[in-house]
Image (tube, rainbow, N blue to C red):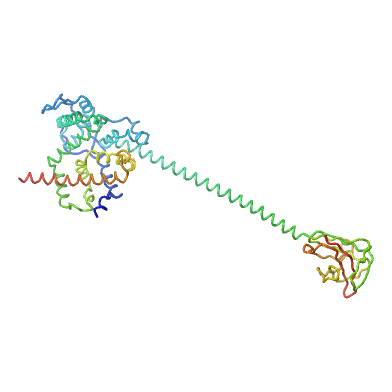
Amino acid sequence: MARVDSERSFSRREEKRILNLAAKVCRTDFPNPERSGCPSPKLLRSLAYRQIPLSETGEFVEHIATCSPCFQEYWRYRRRHKRRIATTAVVFSLGVLASIGIVITGHRLWFQTESTRQQQALARDLVSQQTYSRVVFDLRSRSVSRSDEPREVNAEGNLLLPRSRVLLLIYPPIGSEDGIYDIQLQLPLQPPSVAAHAELQMRNHIETLEVKVDATALTPGNYLMRFRHDKSGWREYSVQVK
Amino acid sequence: MGISEPNPAGSFDLGEVAPFWLPAADADGRVIHAQVEGAARELWPWAFRHVQKELHDGPRALEIVQEVAAEVSGRFEEDAEIGRNLKGYYTTAFINCVRNYVLREGRIEYEGLIRELEENYHPHAPDWIRHFETALSLKLLAAYLSAPMRRMLSYRLSDYSWKEIGVVFNMTDRQVRSRFYYGARKAYDDLLRDQAQRKHSKED
């Protein structure tokens, strides 16, 4: 108990009440209209603005507490100083807040720009992924062969198919019948790696079979491309996948 | 001077201040130091006004100045350090002297206040501070504060933080706050004890 009591001091409320009372006494109980023994207004202001080292304040502080005009004048300066500090603090805080706001907005804009950039790049990638390069197999002048057995028939040279997404435009030999065609791409004696259907249509005044082929997964090598109309025999061509 | 009522708050009586005069030694032969005489001369209008306000008897100020100047001179001879803040020391001594007269002469309002304090006083009451609800009661308490406690109070009144006051007194802020609390509490105890003694001596 004694230990607790030895740590006792005024509570904030008690201290405030005592100080208010004491300030009331100081404001009125020490009239000094002649200002005898008073420090200059400049000194009072310096004291209120805390421009005088603490070690040199004793004399003035004691005088202020025993001279009502000085006490009042000192507190005018002191209030002004505190107001100025408060205003500076508010302005500084607003400045900091504004700076933070600018930084956040800047970051957001940067992120947005970056995000947009990334999205655009992604879109480009997607588009590029979805973009098919055009490859034309012009078979109009090539010899036609119909067979159930795979064999190389186009002695004019291999057709080249890149290992990518390809919009394959096949110009079948002249005289090919209209209608739906089965199209296959396969390694010799292997099941088809690619199988598709396409309708023979006029494209730029040329009979064309148009088919999208994803050849990215194909292993490079010599393939056999064949197509047939309805249930008629296969027309076969050698294709080199690179 | 004909002044019997205190001035309204914030206003001061601008009546004429009596001329200053101080002998080289008081009635008991105590010599008045030249520097103390200088401080007393400079602070004379203030001292006059203070006596006028507290005792409603301006002309008596000269008598009190003489008493205080002799006492301060004696202290000054013993401890030259006082010279560093002679005016402050003199002012405090003068205020204390005037308050002692006020208490000794038993002004009606003070007596009533003391009675009230006594009735409510309990030696270990944790809320003794509650009794100081008027400026008058605080003035009464201040008269019993020791010089360091008065200085602490002056610093606090000038809006210095306990931390800064701690630096002045070479203590931590907690220590200095605690010291002030106990100084005030001691002043309160001394005040009541003195008043009780005074009352008994009157009855005898």
Screen quadrant of the N terminus of chain A:
bottom left
Q: Nearer the viewer, residue B177 or B105?
A: B177
Q: Nearer the viewer, residue A235 or B26?
A: A235
Q: In the visual, does A79 lie left or right of B57?
A: right
Percent x, y of residue A38: 28, 31
Q: Residue at x 26, y 42 (%)?
A: A22
Vertical placement of B45 versus B137: above or below? above
Vertical placement of B73 versus B128: above or below? above
Vertical placement of A227 versus A44: above or below? below
Q: Is residue A27 visible?
A: no
Q: Nearer the viewer, residue B125 or A237?
A: A237
Quadrant for residue A178, please give it: bottom right
Q: Residue at x 7, y 44 (%)?
A: B202
Q: Is residue A11 visible?
A: yes
Q: Nearer the viewer, residue A81 or B156?
A: B156
Screen quadrant of the C terminus of chain A:
bottom right
Percent x, y of residue B93: 20, 34
